[in-house]
Each structure stands twice: as C-alpha cells, then as structure tokens.
Image (cartoon, rainbow, N blue to C red):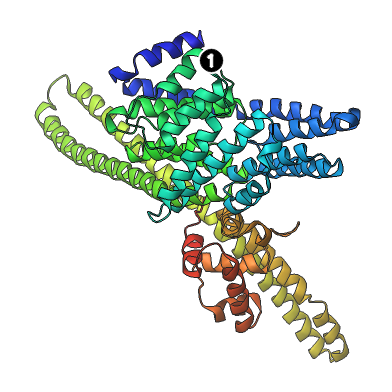
Amino acid sequence: MKFFILNIFLLTFSLNTYSSAKKDSVLAKLKMEISKKKEYDERKLSRIQKLRTDIRRKPNELFDTYLKLFDEYEYYKFDSAYFYGKKMLDLSFKLRNRVKQNESKVKLASLLLHAGMFKETFDYLGEIDATLLDRGFQYAYYALKSGAYSNLAIYNSDENFTKSYNEKAISYIDSAIAFCAPNSVDLLFTMGNRQVVAGETDKPPKYFLELLKKHKLSEHNRARLLTGLAAFYQRDDQNEQRIWLLAESAISDIRSSTKETLATLLLAEDLFKHGDVDNAYHFIQQSRDDAGFYGNRLRKLKIESLLPDIAAKVNMATQREKNKFLTYFISISLVSVVIALVLFMIFIQLRKLKIQDQVIKEKNKELNQINDQLLNINDKLREFATVNEKYIGYFFDVISGYILKLDRLKKNVERKILAKRFGEILPDLNDIDIKREREILFNTFDRVFMSIFPNFITVFNSLLKEEDQIWPKAPELLNTDLRIFALIRLGINDNEAIATILEYSVNTIYVYKMRIKAKALVPGEEFDKIMMLVKAV
C-alpha cells in the first residue's frame, strides 16, 4: 500500500499540484511520529542490549559483534559508536589483521565525518590502504572521501577553496561508482548523489526516482534518499514538494532512531524562509535535541545561530496577536459604551411600554458577557502576578530569616551585657556559622536562578569544547564559574559588584571570566551576547 502511494506521488511531481492541505497533513504526520520517538528508541536499545550480551556469549565473534554495535550506534549516538569503533580497531591490531584494521578506520572516518570533525576524518582516511579492502569497503572508502570533500566545501564556503574541494568530491565519487554493481541500490544512489555534488540539480533526478521505483529501501536509506531528492526542488513554486520530501525523510529518520539527521533542520529552515514560523520553531527545537543527543557540535552551533532568529519571529507573531486582541478589546469596550447609551435612550423611550422588562434583560445579558471577558483578563493578570510573587518570595523569606536571627542575637547580647555575663557573649557569636549561611544564600540563589533559566548551563556549555565544559557536581546547582555568568545574565556586569556578592577579589573575578572566555568557541564579546539571550521560562 505504501509503495502504491509513493508511486502516485512520483507520477504527480511535475504537475505541482500539492496544496497547503497536503503540507499540513505531512507535518501533522511528522509531529505524530515525533511523539512516538521513545517507542522507536526503545526498540533500538533492546537490539543493542542483545548485542552486548553477545560480547560475553560469543567471544570468538567479538569483532563482528563490535561491528554490529557500531552500526547500531553510528547514526544514534556518537560517543558510543566511537567507543565500539575503537574497540574494533584495537582488536584488529591485536589480531594483526591489516584488512580489519583498514575496515575499522573506514568506519571511524565515516563516524567522524557525521560529527563534523573534518581534521580527524582526513587523518584516518590518510592511514587507509584501499588495496587491502574488499569491493564493498572500497566503495565505502571512495564514497566517504567524496563526502568529506563535499562537506568541507559546504563548511568553508570560500570561492578560493570550494571549487577544488568539489572537483575532488566528484573525482572520488566517480571512483566509488566504479565499484558498484550494475543496477544496484549503491549505484543509483551514488549516481543521484553525484548530480547533487556536481550542482546538476536543475536536471531531472532520474537516478533517485528510479531507485524509489525499483527498490525497497530501509527507513534509514529512504531518509537519506529523500533528503538528497529535496535538493532538486529549490524553487519557490516547488516548495510543497520539498516540504513533503523533507518531512517524509524526517519521519523515516525517527522510525530508524536516527539522531544524526539533516532533514529536520532543512525542513525548519525552509518553513522559516516561507513564513511558517510556528512549525519552523517546533522542528528546529527537535533538530537541536537530536544534535545534542547525538553529539554533533558543529550542527548544534548552526542550529543555535538560527534558533534566535526563529524565536524572535515567533515572539513578534505573538506580540501581533496580543496587539490584535487589545484592539478587539478596545473596540468591544467602545461598542459597549455605545450600547449602554443606546440602552439608556431605549429605556427612557420605552419605559411605559410592556416590553420594558424584556429589553432590559437582553441588554443586561450582553453586559454580563462583556463582564465575563473582563474577568477572564483579570484572572490572567492575577496569574502573572502570582508567578512574580513566587520568585520574589524566595529572597523575601531568606532576608526575613536573617532579620529574625539578628534580632534574637541582639536581644540575647543586650541581656547578657546588662547581666554583665560578658564571657557568654563570644560563644553566642561563634554559634553563627557564616560559611554555612553563605552556602544557604548561594544555594537559594542557584535554585531561584535555575527555576527561571533552566537552559542556562546547557547554553553555557554549548559554547565550550567538550573537555572544557563545566557541569556542577551534585548536590550543587551552580559553581563559582557558572555563578559569575549567572549574575551577568541578571544584568550585574561590574566586576566589583560581582566580587562583593561572591566575596572574592575583583582580580579573581576578572581571572575567572577571562579563563572561561579564552576557552570559548566564540569571541569574548559574542560569548556575553549569547549568554544574555538565554530565555527565562
């Protein structure tokens, strides 16, 4: 049945007949699949768990088990895939098997390319002896080299280098084609991919379409194919086809538990470009979550650079709706005033008539409806005030507690001075644990801050390399480094003020800030701007 529907779709592509209803339908389908992500992931994890038991049960097949685990993790989670890739490589050296050594390096290079780690990818590619690989791995090796140069060209986007990178990508993809069997899935996919790499997307995607017609693909390969096919539908009048392809590709990625996915990001960009801000915001958040789970730092940075623009558009749209509502409310109020005046005139004119009571009842009903609307608005304002009171109340309680403690201490000291029991005063003062009080104050600050800015630590660490990231150790919510930038996020930029609050010297605060910014992936000024964009809930 699915194959039949797909054929209908292919036959009608050139007619450009997809309506907005079709787009809404496929986006609704994608959202439904997103809600089932956990179910698909549990199936994958079940397969992984079974393979892990094979490590103990089948010690003679250890390399094959590592390879299967690598394949399961390759597009699911980078760190785990890299772990088993290294296991494969270490075992192949232990066995002194040069074929498996080179196969392991092909797998690791492919993984590193997924994560956007170009230098490491080329390092491994430079160590591979392709003559020791079988036909399938030779195909994978040359396809990988082509992909590496193609991605490098996109990443650099510099006219001085892009042309030569693309030329190398095409040369290596031609080498990969030479290792494909006639009419095979690999051949058709690689030929179609060559069209994309060579910039021939103005021509019909005959290889991709033939592949869809003649071969039954796995969900993962179907996702790759549809993403590639979307490159052929870039014009505005082809927007419906492109959205359908990217949404279906994202659906297949979800069903195959693929987290290293490009389709959702491209879909969000396309929707944003054509004004569908709400859906763009929803899908780019999904793309961000997937990139974070997988561990693709390069893609996370791209998403984080696009997300504020989309969020700003969402806020503008929300503000327009609020302004529209306010306009409606004012109009209704004016109409209500006019209605009240008319009612008064009618009441004066018709007070001697028998229908007087009926007219009053009807007008009162209309006024009651308006009053209900006003009550609803007041309820929303009251709810907003309650939320503010909650955050203010945290520090009010702490300050009140300190005042009570000081009051009790003052009275106790006064009483002992009057009684001339001077020797008992110092022990009472020593009962005050300044260090503990400071810890309580910082802990209270941390809890309130994190309740307002729950994404603060995640955004902070996204600006640092993995080895430089700062994660508080339980039970801490923030440490000194994070607390300094938390105060900056609240608008406290003066080093002297921060030093006073945290009880450090001004020079120490300066050193803390400079040390963090020196390790950041962005310039210091950019670091501060991004931290100030952390959203409050």
Q: Nearer the viewer, residue 324 or 481?
A: 481
Q: Is residue 352 above or below residue 467?
A: above
The kind of secondary structure element at disc 1 is loop
Within 10 Å of disc 1 (Cα), the crowding (few <14, some 14-19, many 20+) is few
Q: Is residue 216 above or below residue 134?
A: above
Q: Residue 183 location in percent, x, y?
A: 52, 17
Q: Quadrant of residue 486?
A: bottom right
Q: Position of residue 198 (x, y in %)?
A: 40, 37
Amino acid type, label 1: His
Q: Residue at x 51, y 55 (%)?
A: 388
Quadrant for residue 221, please give it.
top right
Determine which residue is flagged by label 1: 215
Left or right: where 90 falls relative to 125: right
Eyeballing the image, is 148 above or below 71? Answer: below
Residue 244 visible from this viewpoint: yes
Q: Which percent across, then down, holds residue 84? A: 76, 40
Question: Residue at image x 44%, y 40%?
Answer: 281
Question: Quick one: which residue is furthest to the left in this view?
Answer: 349
Q: Is residue 102 above or below residue 486?
A: above
